Amino acid sequence: MPAPDRADYQVYVVAWSYHTAIILEQPRGWTLGPRDEERAPFVEYAWGDRRFYMESNFWPHAVFAALFLPTASVTYVAGRSRPPAGGFRSMHIRTVSGAELLAIAAELEASIERAADGARQPPYAPVADYSGRFYPGVGSYLWWTDCNRWTVDRLIAAGLARSGRGVIFSAQVAPRLIGFRAVPKAT
């Protein structure tokens, strides 16, 4: 990734019901968005269990596996023209420096499996009800290292959050954030 072209950028942490995501303001010249949206002004990242999150498989055996067995993970990447204006449980924003943005972007990209040449592994086929794409994720999913813990751990790498230890639920993410402020829901 080239050096960011400005001194400050916005980073959002969004709680979509039980699941959290990180949205970055993308600098000009970066191509972090998914296929056909590589240069989107904002890029959303989230991580989770492949069967439960990507495949929406809520059968008892899939839920059991997600809770008690190490399962395959996916990283979700979506291009956005702007941050969400609603539909979220909570959203927090923080202005970050170019160096902080570079650190968090590198950490988020490290959650996607890579080919031998360093490029992202190809995404899975598009999934109904998701505008972005799912990529093979790095690491196994377990209930104590779920999507919400993943969110906090990615932010820790850039100094934007405190310990993710014990984070399981989306409501536990906001108290771990450093320097973020809540964004009111649109009416």
Image (cartoon, helix red, strand yellow):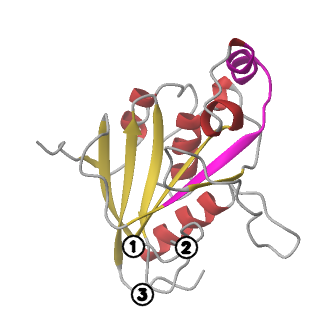
Residue 173 location (% of width, % of height) = 43, 35
Residue 17 location (% of width, % of height) = 39, 30
Most extreme residue toward the top is 60
Nearer the camera: disc 2 or disc 1 = 2
Image point (60%, 47%), residue name: 127
Magenta stretch holds residue 137: no
Characterize the local packing of mark 2: few (<14), some (14-19) or many (20 or more) Cα atoms within 10 angstroms: few
Name the image quarter holding the C terminus: top left
Report the residue marked by disc 1.
41
Report the residue marked by disc 2.
36
Image mark for residue 94: none
Residue 82 location (% of width, % of height) = 31, 64
Residue type pointed to by label 3: Asp
Q: Is residue 180 left or right of residue 114?
A: left
* Label 2 element class: loop
Q: Is residue 139 above or below residue 168?
A: below
Residue type pointed to by label 1: Pro
Separation of residues labelled 3 and 2 (CA atoms): 22 Å
Most extreme residue toward the right is 116
| Stretch in magenta | 61-78
Between 133 and 3, the one nearer to me in the picture: 133
Indicate which disc, 3 or 2, sits on the residue closer to the N terminus. 3
Residue 79 location (% of width, % of height) = 46, 64
Report the residue marked by disc 3.
5
Q: Does the rendering let one see residue 161?
A: no
